[in-house]
Image (spheres, helix red, strand yellow):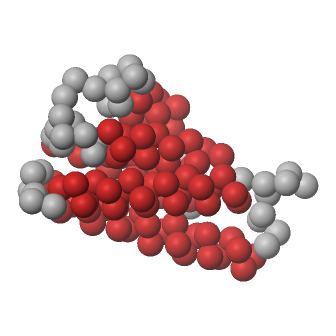
Amino acid sequence: MNPKDMSGDKELMDLFYEETQELIDAMIKNLSDLKDNPQPPDLGGQVKEMFRCTHIIKSSSDTVGFDSLQKVAQCLENVFKAGLDENFKITPERISLFLEGIEACQKLLKKQEGCNYEELIERLNKEVPNRGGFDG
């Protein structure tokens, strides 16, 4: 058994699924709010909350051995960290990309097929300074 494979611990896995879904739902709500108002007065707070959610998803996914989910969450975490910079603009295109990343997390959580996360990771990395992107 893989030391990271916690699939035999039903209680832990149930908690992981439940909490991760709650975090994904919170991020979807934040992005929906940003779509309606891309420059709200509390933009930093919304971005910080999404950063916190992706950080928790990344860490807990690593703990239970969901490597693909951990990789996508890591990229989203990096993007939201960059989003805390005042020069990082939240555009409709970025909101769509962020939502695509969050939807990929949801698919990976539910073990659904059809999630090309490698290509998504590449596009997310282009949004982060020092990772091939960030043009303001």
Q: Is residue 6 above or below residue 73?
A: below
11 over 65 or under it: above or below = below
Q: Residue at x 82, y 69 (%)?
A: 8
133 to 6, vertically: above or below: above
Q: Total of numbered circles in the picture?
A: 0
* Residue 27 locus on image (x, y percent): 34, 61
Residue located at (53% from left, 72% from top): 19
Image position of 55 with respect to 94: above or below: below
Image location of residue 67, percent across then percent down: 65, 46
Which quadrant, please, contains the N terminus?
bottom right
In this view, the residue farthest toward the top is 132
Would you say residue 108 is visible in this rendering? no
Residue at horizontal 46%, vertical 34%? 121
Is residue 114 left or right of 89 when viewed as pictured?
right
Q: Nearer the viewer, residue 88 or 66?
A: 88
Q: Is residue 127 left or right of residue 107?
A: left
* Quadrant of the image occupied by residue 120: top left
Q: Quadrant of residue 127?
A: top left
Can residue 15 be seen by looking at this rendering?
yes
Residue 51, given in percent of the width and then of the height, sits at 38, 53
State the image coordinates of residue 39 (x, y, percent, origin top left): 9, 51
User: In front: 39, or 11?
Assistant: 39
Judging depth in this view, the residue of 22 and 134 nearest the camera is 134
Q: In the drawing, does residue 61 fall left or right of residue 55?
A: right
Residue at 32 percent across and 50 percent down: it is 99
Spot the residue most to the right. Answer: 1
- Nearer the observer, 78 or 17: 78
Quarter of the image that includes the C terminus? top left
